[in-house]
Every structure is written in structure tokens, then in C-alpha cells.
Image (cartoon, rainbow, N blue to C red):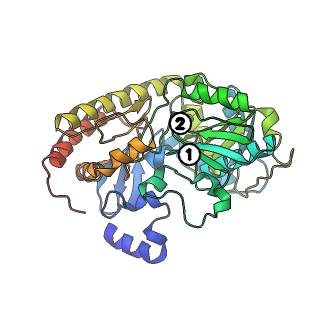
Amino acid sequence: MSDELFARASRVIPGGVNSPVRSFKSVGGTPYFVERARGAFVMDTEGNSYLDYVQSWGASILGHADAGVLEAIRRASERGTSFGAPTESEVRLAEILAASVNGLELIRLVSSGTEATMTAVRIARGATGRDRIVKFAGCYHGHSDALLAEGGSGVATLGLAGSGGVPAGAVADTVVAPYNVVPHLDDSVACVIVEPAAANMGLVPPASGFLAGLRAACDSAGALLIFDEVITGFRLGPGSVAQLYGVKPDLWTFGKVIGGGLPLAAVGGRRDVMEHLAPLGPVYQAGTLSGNPLATAAGLAVLDRLAPADFEQLSVRVSTLAKGLAEVISSAGLPVQVPCERTLFSVLFSTDPVRNYEDAKVAAANGLYGKFFHAMLDRGVALAPSPYEVGFCSLAHSDLDVERTIEAAAQAATEVADGAPFQA
């Protein structure tokens, strides 16, 4: 069934997928097509059930098809699906975000992480009157032209340095620096945009002093600091990682969790900076579906449910998983790093810790991840189909699910180490 669907899809959709990393290009084989999902599991069109660590790339922190989220969407849909006018749910969601994050004073809701980061950069340029932006190799900030240079995620998965169709002028003012190294900034720089915990080249935590160094460098140069928390926001804890690391940016972007699995993201920050955004200021942004009532209903249902104890529980569970994976994979004789940052983890087949994009590319180049991915899939465990993506646990994952995953990893790692034939 998956082969047939992929063949049909390939005739009408470029590459058969609507987002490149779904194509299995870096791991080989044909992608499974999901028919339905519930809690920690997805079921494909052939009736196979997989313990899922993709979880819609982190959006489903409560697990798939959570009853409370579905009910909130149902109630909202009965009132209408899109109005092109403001709604109370937009206000409530913005109020919750502002109350959860110190320094988040004004918020604009959009429909995707790409929209949020693109808008954040435009605001920074408008507020400072400068053009140059600094990003870090391996950090993915969506697919807008200026931010694709040396991006992680699907850009890295496909082995691209950037993207075709991006004119030289679009990236002429983009400076790419190595992650975990504080770059020199001058008065031409409008902003520095960074994933405070990089999650698009595997998981690469910030080195001690890195984020504080960025804050100091931006202050010295008069540039703005942007935290891209599309992945980490409301995932590592009840708000921004700024509270975990003790470094406050000027602007934030959020996505994934805050939309409850529906298309929704946000850009926000200091009042004086955000007031440059139309209709208050000259920096333009708009969106027909921005603040969509179904998406805000889903987001509110998730955020209303999450409590600090949930994040602590999830952190313990992910820590147990990461330690177990590292132990059984290394015991099989494979080189491995399983970094864990509270509720995020990744499996990197490397002898040494991965500190930046260059290290991540070395870990991906040996081809072990693809073999391990398929060996796990054969045992009913779905990891991300790319060595550059992270793993996501949900609150629906149980201790038993973690034990089962570690047992599967022990068998899969032994199979890979023994050189069992891999069938793509």
C-alpha cells in the first residue's frame, strides 16, 4: 500500500511528499503513509503500528489525537473555521504566551515557523535600520531566502548548502558563523538569530557562556538577539528556554507545541521593538489565516493542560531513554552519542560529542543512522527519517514504551553491528 501510494504521490507531488525530509531520501526506502494516530503511536495504511518519536516534529506534546484537543477543535469548528476578523481566542492565546515568558510583551500570531522567523528578521531590520543578519551553520530557521544558508533539518538531510532559486542578493547580507562560537559583530548587524538549543543538526546544546556571549555581543554592537524557539518553546519547559539558561533575547519565535498540532506560530518580544510592526509601524506582515480559530483553540487546549510537573516527568522519561539508548548501542560496538536536553534527544553515530554542524555532518556521513532507523522501524519504533533531526517524546509515552524502545534498540544495534543486509 505505501509503495502504491508513494508511486501515486510521485506523479502529482514533487518527490511524492509535501516536505522533503518525509521522503526517506537520507535513510533509503519508501516512506510509510499514516492512516491514523493515537497517543504515542501512529498506524500506517498497511496496518502496522509504530511507537512514534516524531510526534509531528514535536507539535504533539500531549500525544496524537488527544481527546481534549480534539474536543476543543470540534467546538471551535461549529462556530466557523476562518473569519478574516479578530477573535477572543487569539487574545487569550497571546495573553497566555505573554504571561509565560518574561519579556514577551507584544505577540503576532502567524501560521508557520517560517513566517515567524522571516517576520522576526524583518522587524529587526526595521527597528535597527540595518541590513546584515548573523545565523549559525546547522540552525534551521524555516525556508525564507535569507535564512536557508547552511541550514540544518531538511537542508542538511538533502546535502544542500542552501537552495536553488535563491538569488545571490537575497543572502548577500547573511553571515553564517559556527555554532557555539560567539562571532564578532559590528554596527552593520541588525540581528543575530539562533536556536538556543540547536535541534536541526541532531541535538547540540549551547556551550557554557555561548548564549550569554551572544547577548553581550549584541548589546555592544546595538544589534537585536532573536531566539528561534519554534522547537524548544513550551517543549523544554513551561515557556522559553531563556528562563532555563538565564539569557533574555529581544525577539522570540514560537511554533509546534503552541498550535496543538495545527498550523500556528508566533513572533514576539520587547514592546518598543514589536511596535515597528504594522499597523503600528512601517514593518509590514499579514496573513489571511493568522490566528486561525481552530489552531488557537487547539493551542489553548494544550497550554491550559501543561503544568511544570508535566515537563519534569517528561524530562525524567527522556533522560532514562537517552541513557538506555546510549548504553545498548555502545554495547553493540557502535560509536554513539545520545545527547539529551530535558525533553529532547537525538541519536548521533559518533565517537566524539557533536558541538557544531561540522561535527554533525561527520556523524551523519558514516551511514549508520539509516541502517539503525530501518532496524528500529522493523521492530515497530519510528524515529525521525534523518540523522539531523531530534526525537520527541510525548506525555502519552509510558515507562513501558521507553523500556520497549531500549530493548528494540539493543536488537537493532546488534543487527547493524553484525552487518545484517539492509533492504531499502
Which of the numbered marks, if any, corresponds to residue 71?
1
| In the depicted structure, whether residue 274 falls above or below residue 263 | above
| In the depicted structure, whether residue 35 falls above or below residue 186 | below
Q: Secondary structure at mark 1?
A: helix
- Is residue 250 toward the left or the right of residue 256 in the image? right
Residue 405 appears at what percent x and percent y? 27, 39
Q: Secondary structure at mark 2?
A: loop
Quadrant assignment for the C terminus: bottom left
Badge 2 amino acid: Thr
> Could you tell me which residue is drawn at 68 percent across and 60 percent down?
169
- Residue 65 in view here: no
Quadrant assignment for the N terminus: bottom left
- Residue 121 in view here: yes
- Is residue 176 toward the left or the right of residue 1 in the image? right
Pick whichever, 247 or 212, lies toward us.
Answer: 212
Residue 366 appears at what percent x and percent y? 28, 50
* Mark 2, residue position: 232
> Could you tell me which residue is drawn at 69 percent across and 53 percent down?
79
Pick whichever, 122 or 413, lies toward us.
Answer: 122
Badge 1 amino acid: Glu
Density class for disc 1 (Cα within 10 Å; few <14, some 14-19, many ≥20) is some
Residue 258 appears at what percent x and percent y? 59, 41
